[in-house]
Image (cartoon, helix red, strand yellow):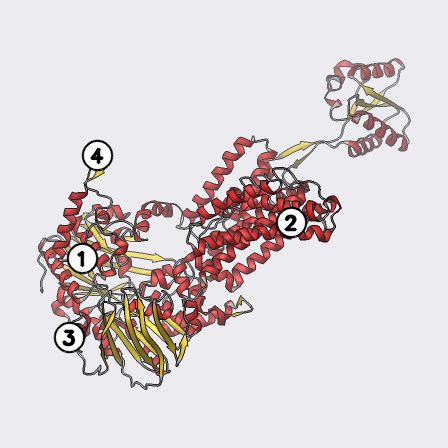
């Protein structure tokens, strides 16, 4: 996969000296990017390195302060998303741009409906949608409403939509984050197919192994600056990580010796519709329990039952041997159970509010006296977390929406760590997070376990599951299909077998 | 942490929270100048001024003629009598006084001329000085030489800036201002309450009904009618509770719930009084609405300021305030952070209802009667004030004092248009456009001027897409 098919020709896309600042944050410092026809360019960098900003400049969501963009040698003025689309750029953002109440078909053809005299030709659109999904190798009903789809299916609809507009440049921002292994393979097939058609692809991912499999060139950003661009053949895994974090990283997972205590949390035959069926398990003090399985296996749903976010049909939850009557998240928090959501934007943060207020929200009972919030305590506590967790934020009044994805995740972490719970549920804690920040989060999890907390980690990343946990529970279609106590001797294959429901044990 | 930019950031935050204060000041400045007029003293002031001037002249021994017009309100008569008295008190004797028409003055001058005397001055009012005879004295009586005409001097003043007018601006919308506090709570949670206008009437009617039926009508004691007022407020708080219950337990959109309750409450107001006014109230009941016990400041204004201060502290300093903002900003994230979302929303609707009840009771006290027609359309002015004050209808953002500024902006515009004789129909058009302008300005400011406006227009699509 070394070599660039169109290297001698005019570049498909050339971005020169792109500069962009937000209130107090210099997000991009004169970045150059070149993409050839039929090339897959991987864009790498830690969270907050400027990847998303660069992509949003290309997509017309942000206007660059300076710099130029040329497509096939001609200067392109990308002032808004329409101009970007018209220039042949299609962007699949990390946050879906689908309208939940509309059908898959309507979403795919939104804004360019296949119509006769204003009347939509539904059957035509239906067939085309079917074709698109056939190409991706997935079976999604084009008439299903998007809100009924799983996260993975929604992502697929996004990809189908981008493919359908016949873009010359397709940008994929973390396309595989919500996909299962099988789906990722299909995604790669599509990417290779697009390459063959001469389409240039900018591929953003934190999964380095994917990049080595699919990318032709890789470009690394750090703190808004370009660290370098290399052919994929000229670089290896360690070198790439070093470029990203600016230092050598010894181990991906920090070592620790677990000291298990008594059983803290126990779930007994939890049930909720078809999503969670007879789920029973327990977590000990000082233990990291991994809850894994494919997307939609019921892991998150189980966590939501324990946290009181959803009502359970039946089942008991007990903490330190005493039965809990958790009816809502407030009860759970009062019983020192907390949960970091997988979706920080819609569930984890109040985006329009300041980072300090977000940090304080679950902790106000400790920051207040007689109902009055002591803002100076709140602020100083928050600043401690900013320092120790290295959250990049201009000041404590910055709005949460102005933070990069990784820093948002750190903010969510900070607000729950301050809460000092006994049982902590991490739901996909490292999704969309770079290598350096991942390591910091792993260290935090280890520290929490060492302090005698019970940690439940929901994760789809098998290396993470194997590298971090003391015990693994695998779920499939709402039920537990297996438990692995000998983590050191477990393999990814064994977990996968359990996850797809073909496990023997 | 970026320390040097803190002052600048604070300024920017202040402007984004309270930017409409600039609009309010601009309006005040505009009307201060637009209402400048020249006025002339009347009555005692005019008498004193004219008399002083004449006494200071003391030129020779000519006759001083004091002239006043013979008009229906006897102002001219009073002026002449007063001035003559003042001049005599100053030792002047040679005075001729006339109350009548220009012809009378001509005769008087002729009389002096015939007797060979001189007229040293004519002291008169502003009205009389405009008689053709006086303006052309030189032509008509060239032989009399130079006759000084003494009139009160005109002075310019801004009618807007008069103490009485400012007091008027501050108190004219006090009921709306008080209810707007509750509306701000509700709107910050992402809701709306359309029932408040009807609640004004329901509260006033409930309280007045109780006074008339149970407290002895005109002879009701202060304690008794205070209890009746609380009954009115309580009834409205109950309606607010129902609103909140419908919104939280049954997830009915607030617009629909409160629209229905708007009709119910209005109907109840008519049913309570069987469609009639309740005016058999004791005189002392106007204490709240018309009294001014603290340094001459109206009681309603004192109450309003206290309520705003309390609401501001609640929203900016307490846990409850934080929760209200969080619920409006992202209800699900708030719930998952342990915020009792439903109780918070319920609280806001109850407060909004209770404050509407208080508003109704105040109106009853101001007008000393209860009417089922009170507060018609008030909900719209209240919502407008909240929105003009910078609170976002989508929830999560807004400031209590912003709402007060919003109320004042509306009051100043209404008052200014009255002073500059703008017709009431035109006033409605202007107010409507101001509300639209305020909201537009707010959304533009959110994204830095023109660039922000452009982004606002282009980004709308992708924003709605990501919801």
**Dot 3 lies on which element?**
helix
Which is nearer the eye, A447 or B383?
B383
Q: Which residue is mark 1?
A: A34
In the image: residue B211, left or right of residue B447: right
**Which numbered disc, 1 or 3, marks the residue that appears first in the sequence?**
1
Q: Which mark is residue B301?
A: 2
C-alpha distance separating marks 3 and 4: 55 Å
Residue at 44% across, 46% down: B256
Mark count: 4
**Which numbered disc, 3 or 4, marks the residue that appears first in the sequence?**
4
Q: Which residue is mark 3?
A: A493
Q: Which residue is mark 4?
A: A117
Measured from the top left, where is residue B163 in percent x and y?
A: 68, 42
Which is nearer the eye, A31 or A417?
A417
Residue count near mark 3 (Cα–Cα under 10 Å), binned few <14, some 14–19, many ≥20: few
**Which numbered disc, 1 or 4, marks the residue that appears first in the sequence?**
1
Q: Is residue B345 above or below residue A213?
A: above
C-alpha distance separating marks 1 and 3: 39 Å
C-alpha distance separating marks 3 and 2: 75 Å
**CB within 8 Å, label 1 to label 4:** no
In the image: residue A76, left or right of residue B416: left
Measured from the top left, where is residue B412 in percent x and y?
A: 58, 41
C-alpha distance separating marks 2 and 4: 62 Å
Do discs 2 and 1 belong to a common subunit?
no
Which quadrant would residue B202 be assigned to in this image?
Answer: top right
The quarter of the image holding the C terminus of chain A is bottom left
Task: Select label 1 or label 3 by which is in front.
Answer: 3
Task: Select label 2 or label 1 by which is in front.
Answer: 2
- Which subunit holds the residue at mark 2? B
Residue count near mark 1 (Cα–Cα under 10 Å), binned few <14, some 14–19, many ≥20: some
- Which subunit holds the residue at mark 3? A
Q: Is residue A475 above or below residue B81?
A: below
């Amino acid at each position: 996969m070394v070599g660039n098919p169109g290297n001698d020709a005019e570049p498909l896309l050339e971005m020169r000296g792109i500069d962009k600042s937000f209130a107090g944050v210099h997000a991009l410092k004169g970045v150059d990017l070149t993409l050839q026809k039929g090339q897959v360019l991987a864009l790498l960098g830690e969270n907050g390195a400027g990847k998303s900003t660069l992509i949003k400049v290309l997509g017309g969501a942000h206007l660059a302060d300076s710099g130029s963009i040329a497509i096939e040698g001609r200067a392109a003025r990308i002032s808004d998303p329409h101009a970007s689309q018209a220039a042949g750029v299609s962007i699949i953002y990390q946050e879906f741009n689908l309208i939940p109440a509309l059908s898959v078909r309507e979403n795919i053809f939104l804004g360019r409906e296949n119509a006769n005299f204003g009347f939509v030709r539904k059957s035509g659109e239906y067939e085309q949608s079917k074709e698109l999904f056939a190409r991706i190798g997935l079976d999604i009903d084009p008439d299903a409403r998007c809100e009924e789809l799983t996260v993975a299916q929604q992502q697929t609809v996004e990809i189908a939509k981008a493919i359908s507009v016949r873009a010359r440049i397709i940008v994929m921002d973390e396309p595989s984050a919500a996909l299962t292994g099988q789906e990722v393979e299909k995604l790669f097939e599509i990417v290779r197919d697009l390459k063959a058609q001469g389409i240039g692809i900018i591929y953003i991912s934190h999964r380095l192994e994917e990049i080595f499999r699919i990318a032709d060139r890789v470009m690394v950003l750090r703190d808004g600056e370009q660290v370098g661009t290399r052919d994929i053949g000229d670089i290896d895994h360690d070198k790439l990580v070093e470029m990203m974090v600016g230092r050598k990283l010894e181990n991906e997972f920090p070592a620790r010796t677990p000291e298990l205590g008594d059983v803290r949390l126990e779930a007994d035959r939890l049930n909720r519709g078809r999503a969670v069926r007879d789920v029973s398990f327990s977590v000990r003090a000082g233990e990291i329990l991994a809850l894994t399985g494919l997307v939609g296996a019921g892991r998150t749903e189980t966590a939501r039952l324990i946290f009181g976010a959803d009502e359970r049909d039946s089942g008991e939850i007990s903490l330190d041997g005493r039965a809990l009557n958790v009816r809502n998240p407030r009860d759970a928090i009062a019983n020192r159970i907390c949960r970091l959501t997988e979706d920080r934007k819609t569930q984890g943060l109040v985006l329009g509010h300041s980072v300090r207020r977000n940090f304080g929200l679950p902790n106000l009972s400790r920051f207040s006296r007689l109902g009055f919030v002591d803002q100076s305590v709140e602020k100083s506590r928050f600043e401690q977390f900013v320092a120790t967790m290295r959250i990049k934020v201009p000041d404590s009044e910055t709005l949460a929406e102005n933070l990069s994805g990784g820093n948002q995740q750190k903010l969510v972490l900070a607000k729950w760590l301050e809460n000092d719970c006994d049982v902590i549920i991490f739901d996909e804690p490292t999704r969309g997070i770079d290598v350096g920040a991942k390591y910091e989060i792993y260290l935090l999890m280890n520290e929490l376990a060492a302090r005698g907390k019970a940690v439940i980690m929901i994760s789809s990343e098998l290396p993470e599951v194997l590298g971090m946990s003391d015990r693994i529970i695998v779920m499939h279609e709402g039920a537990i299909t297996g438990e692995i106590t000998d983590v050191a001797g477990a393999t990814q294959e064994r977990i996968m077998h359990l996850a797809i429901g073909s496990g023997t044990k | 942490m970026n320390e040097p930019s803190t002052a600048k950031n604070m300024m920017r935050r202040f402007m984004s929270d309270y930017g409409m204060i600039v609009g309010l000041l601009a309006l005040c400045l505009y009307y201060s100048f637009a209402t400048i007029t020249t006025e002339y003293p009347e009555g005692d002031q005019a008498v004193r001024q004219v008399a002083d001037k004449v006494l200071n002249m003391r030129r020779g021994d000519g006759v001083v003629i004091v002239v006043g017009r013979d008009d229906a309100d006897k102002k001219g008569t009073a002026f002449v009598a007063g001035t003559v008295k003042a001049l005599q008190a100053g030792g002047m004797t040679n005075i001729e006084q006339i109350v009548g028409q220009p012809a009378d003055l001509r005769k008087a001058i002729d009389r002096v001329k015939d007797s060979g005397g001189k007229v040293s001055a004519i002291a008169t009012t502003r009205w009389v000085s405009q008689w053709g005879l006086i303006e052309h004295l030189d032509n008509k009586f060239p032989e009399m030489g130079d006759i000084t005409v003494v009139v009160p001097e005109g002075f310019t003043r801004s009618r807007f800036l008069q103490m009485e007018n400012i007091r008027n601006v501050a108190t004219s919308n006090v009921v709306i201002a008080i209810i707007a506090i509750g509306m701000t709570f509700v709107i910050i949670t992402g809701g709306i309450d359309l029932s408040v206008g009807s609640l004004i009437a329901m509260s006033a009617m409930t309280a007045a009904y109780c006074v008339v039926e149970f407290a002895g009508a005109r002879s009701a004691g202060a304690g008794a009618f205070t209890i009746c007022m609380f009954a009115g407020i309580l009834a409205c708080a109950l309606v607010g509770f129902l609103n909140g219950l419908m919104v939280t337990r049954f997830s009915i959109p607030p617009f629909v719930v409160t629209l229905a309750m708007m009709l119910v409450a209005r109907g109840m107001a008519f049913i309570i009084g069987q469609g009639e006014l309740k005016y058999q109230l004791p005189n002392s009941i106007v204490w709240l609405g018309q009294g001014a016990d603290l340094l001459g400041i109206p009681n309603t204004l004192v109450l309003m300021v206290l309520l705003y201060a309390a609401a501001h502290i609640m929203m900016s300093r307490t846990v409850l305030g934080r929760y209200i903002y969080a619920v409006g900003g992202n209800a699900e994230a708030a719930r998952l952070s342990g915020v009792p979302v439903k109780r918070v929303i319920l609280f806001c609707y109850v407060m909004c209802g209770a404050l509407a009840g208080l508003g109704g009771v105040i109106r009853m006290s101001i007008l000393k009667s209860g009417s089922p027609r009170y507060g018609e359309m008030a909900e719209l002015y209240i919502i407008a004030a909240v929105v003009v004050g910078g609170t976002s209808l989508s929830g999560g953002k807004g400031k209590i004092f912003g709402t007060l500024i919003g109320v004042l902006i509306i009051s100043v515009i209404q008052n200014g248009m009255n002073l500059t004789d703008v017709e009431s129909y035109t006033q409605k058009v202007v107010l409507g456009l101001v509300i639209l302008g305020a909201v537009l300005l707010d959304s533009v400011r959110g994204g830095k001027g023109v660039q922000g406006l452009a982004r606002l227009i282009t980004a709308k699509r992708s924003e709605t897409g990501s919801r």
